[in-house]
Image (tube, grey):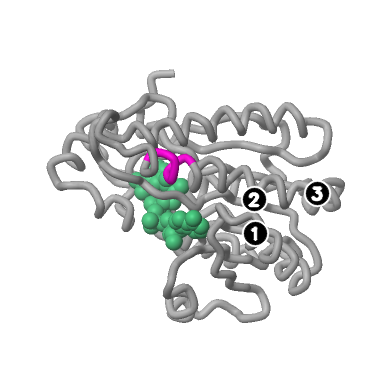
Amino acid sequence: MIRQASLAGARYDFSGRVAVVSGGMGGLGQAITKCLMDAGASVAVWDARADLTQAAGALAYPPERISLHKVDITDEAAVVAAAKETVSKFGHIDTLVNNAGILGPVVDTWEHTAEQFRRVLDVNLVGAFICIRVLVPWLMKNASGPWRARIVNVASIQGKEGMPQASAYAASKAGLIALTKTLGKELADSGILVNAITPAAVMTDMSLEITQERMQSILARIPMGRFLLSEEVAAQVMWLCSADCSFATGAVFDLSGGRATY
Ligand SMILES: NC(=O)c1ccc[n+]([C@@H]2O[C@H](COP(=O)([O-])OP(=O)(O)OC[C@H]3O[C@@H](n4cnc5c(N)ncnc54)[C@H](O)[C@@H]3O)[C@@H](O)[C@H]2O)c1
C-alpha cells in the first residue's frame, strides 16, 4: 500500500514574473509563495493575518522580491491600494493566485446565522472576485508575454461534492468554480488563462479548526488513504502558472486523491 507523496520537484524559471498570492502567509499560501520565490518570481502577499510581518520574517525571503500587504480581500478599496503598491514596487503583475479563504462554522446548514453564511461567501467568493476585478486590467497589460498571464483560484473538493456541516464553505467554493469557468471563457482569447484547483484536506491551520473525529471521516473518503500535502498543491499551482500549461483555461483540476466522482 503506497501512502507517501513522490514529488519530483519540477524546476521552472519564473524570473521577471510578479505574482499576487492572497492568503500567502497561510498554510497553502506559504507553500505557493515559497515555490514561486524559489523559481525566481517576485511575490506580493495579500493577507489579513495580524502577525503578517513576523510570519514572513521567519521565512527570510529576499526583500527585493517580496512585498507584504495586510489586506482584507473583501475590502475593495484596500485591494485597489494593495494593487497600486504592488505595481509601484515591482512594475507589473502577471499572476494572481486567489488562495485566501476561511472555513466558517462547522454546523448544519440551518444552524448558520445569515451573517456567518454571508461572511464565508464574502471572503471565499466575493473576495476572490474583487481581486479579479481589480487585477484583470493589470494582467491584461502582460498577457502577451511569453508566459501570458495567469489566474489560479484555490477552490475545494467540497465545492464539487458538498460536505455535511460545511454548506457555506462548499457553496462558496462551488461559486468559485463557476466563476473560474465563466471568467476562463470571457478571457480565453486575451492571453490570461484562468483555472481552479479543488484540493482535498491538507493539514494546515484551517484543518486544526476541525475535530479529530471529523478529520478521520474526511480521510476515510480519500481513496489514496492519506491527506494532501501543501507542497503538492504548490506544485499544481506552479504548473498552472507555467508556460507548460498552454491550452487549459476555465478548467478545474482535482487534487482529491481519488475522492472526486466527476
Ligand atoms: N487546508 C485544506 O484542507 C484545504 C482544502 C481545500 C481547499 N483549501 C483552500 O485553500 C486556501 C488556503 O487554505 P489554508 O489551508 O492554507 O488555510 P489557512 O487558514 O492556513 O490560510 C488561509 C489564509 O487566508 C488568509 N485570509 C483569511 N481571510 C482573509 C481575508 N478576508 N483577506 C485576506 N486574507 C485572508 C488568512 O490570514 C490565512 O493566512 C483556502 O482558500 C482554503 O479554502 C484548503
Tag 2–tag 1 contact (CB < 8 Å) = yes
Q: Which amino acid, by three-letter code, is at mark 2? A: Cys
> Looking at the image, is mark 2 or mark 1 earlier in the sequence?
1
Label 3 packing within 10 angstroms: few (<14), some (14-19), many (20+)? few
Cα separation between marks 2 and 1: 7 Å
Task: Find the distance from the CA under tag 3 to the CA under tag 2.
Answer: 11 Å
User: For the residue marked with disc 1, what is the amino acid?
Assistant: Val
Q: Residue at x 69, y 65 (%)?
A: 81
- Indicate the position of residue 198 as horizontal and vertical percent values: 46, 36
216 sits left or right of 133 in the view: left
User: Would you say 253 lies left or right of 66 here?
Assistant: left
Give percent across and percent down for residue 107: 23, 37
Residue beneath disc 3 = 137
Name the kind of residue labelled 3 in the image.
Pro
Which residue lies at the image location 54% right of the left edge and 69% below the top edge? Answer: 70
Q: Main secondary structure of the magenta part?
A: helix
- The image quarter in which residue 180 lies: top right
Please check the rendered image and state whether residue 46 is part of the magenta-colored stretch, yes or no. no
Please state if 204 lies on the left or on the right of 82 as rendered.
left
Upstream in the sequence, badge 3 or badge 2?
A: 2
The foreground one among 234 and 118 is: 118
Q: Which residue is mark 2?
A: 131
Residue beneath label 1, please? 79
- The N terminus sits in image quarter: top left
- The location of residue 208, given as percent across then percent down, is 25, 54
Residue found farthest to the top: 262
Q: Which residues are magenta?
A: 117-121
Q: Count numbered badges in the picture.
A: 3
Instruction: Please determine whether, in this image, residue 154 is positioned above or below residue 86.
Output: above
Figure check: 161 above or below 26: above
State the residue in front, 186 or 84: 84
